[in-house]
Amino acid sequence: MIVLHDPDTLLHDTVELVGAKIRSALESLARIRTIVEKLSESGEHSLRTIQSPLTSDDPSELKALLSIIEWTHGREYLDHLKNAFDQWRVEQLIEQHENILPECFVYPTKVHADPRPPKDVFARAGYFAFDMSSGIMSQTYRSVIASANLASRSVRYVIEFKHIPGHGAPSVFALCRPPGHHCDGNRAGGYCYINNAAVCISKYRSLSPFAESARVGILDLDFHHGNGTQELYYSDPQVFYASIHGEDEFPYYTGAASETGAGDAVGANLNLPLATGSDFEEYMKKLNQALIALRDFRPEFLVVSLGFDTFHLDPLGSFQISTEHYALIAAEVRRVLADLPTVILLEGGYVLEHLGENVKSFLEGWEA
Ligand code: Q9C
Ligand code: ZN
């Protein structure tokens, strides 16, 4: 399996608010470090290092990526991610590792149905975010762009690869960080700043001769519901979103089975919430349901949002999935959908001691 990585994804280093305490975010740079280490020592996977367009000499690369990101993300929001930290820095003397966390969240009122972003940088942070786990530090933008770039490059890889007869369709695994599935294009949240799955879909459509009509499937296997991805494609009949996630868990306001899509897209959104503490057997039933629905949609391209916070020891999850199970999960996805070119994107997963072997197990099951 080809695995794409960019060292720039390690630059972002934030804090989160838990209770009344600020602590380093669970979504840490050590996650990528440990995965890269594990995959390089095993030698079975070809780990390729990609250069971020922010460090490239060719300015057209950045322009091209931004135009793809802007299919689904607001310009003002992206400018905020890029500039918030420096705006604050010129106002006062601060340290490199300090973070911008929201002061005041936006909320609808009778007076302002569609409030505009405020001037104050901490107030803006609350306009462009929905939680306190998604702070902006000096290097956040660099990692966010590197992460989105990995998603975009993965699409090129799977499209350019030859389909070897007798093997499944080409697939690539992108070591994205920060993750993406909680971002809806105008708000950061749940450690996510740019929706990398949406970047894949826009990139795929930009390369497809019948852009908007390309049918795409998304399989979201992170422990948390991908509210951002769901929101972006909720009324898009050409995109099928399927998610298996913890019921009544973060992000709390979405993920119910009753959310099935809007307008022409009714039936193209499938939420399969699982009760707290669900085990592998229960998980596999939902997985099979998701895979059958995706197959019946007849997409031509698949994005897997892959979180390892379904692991039994994960501090943010409650499912009883073990390292060996990831191979079985991957094999099952491949058994049903192997004819689809697939990009796998890293989302969550927070047990540093097991993250590398869990990823390895998944990739082994995928290739078996
Ligand atoms: N006590 C992903 O897995 N809340 N995001 C953390 C910590 C945010 C999870 C609170 C959870 C976000 C990509
Ligand atoms: Zn998650």
Image (cartoon, helix red, strand yellow):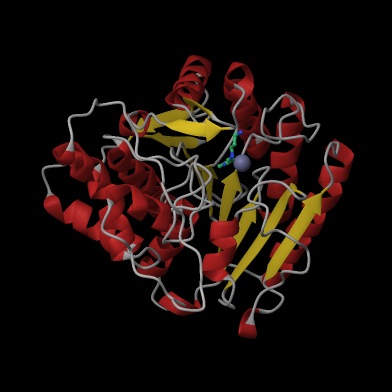
Q: Quadrant of residue 8?
A: top left
Above or below for 330 versus 353: below
Q: Left of 296 or right of it: where is 51?
A: left
Q: List x then y, in percent, for residue 346.
A: 53, 40
Residue sitting at x 86%, y 36%: 279
Q: Quadrant of residue 306?
A: top right
Residue sitting at x 28%, y 34%: 139
Above or below for 328 versus 211: above
Does residue 218 appear anywhere in the picture? yes
Q: List x then y, in percent, for residue 341.
A: 54, 55
**Which of the pair 219/182 is nearer the observer?**
182
**Which of the pair 355/205 is nearer the observer?**
355
Task: Locate the C terminus by quadrant.
Answer: top right
**The quarter of the picture showing ligand 2:** top right
Does residue 128 appear anywhere in the picture? no
Q: List x then y, in percent, for residue 246.
A: 75, 46
Q: Left of 297 or right of it: where is 141?
A: left
Q: List x then y, in percent, for residue 249.
A: 71, 46
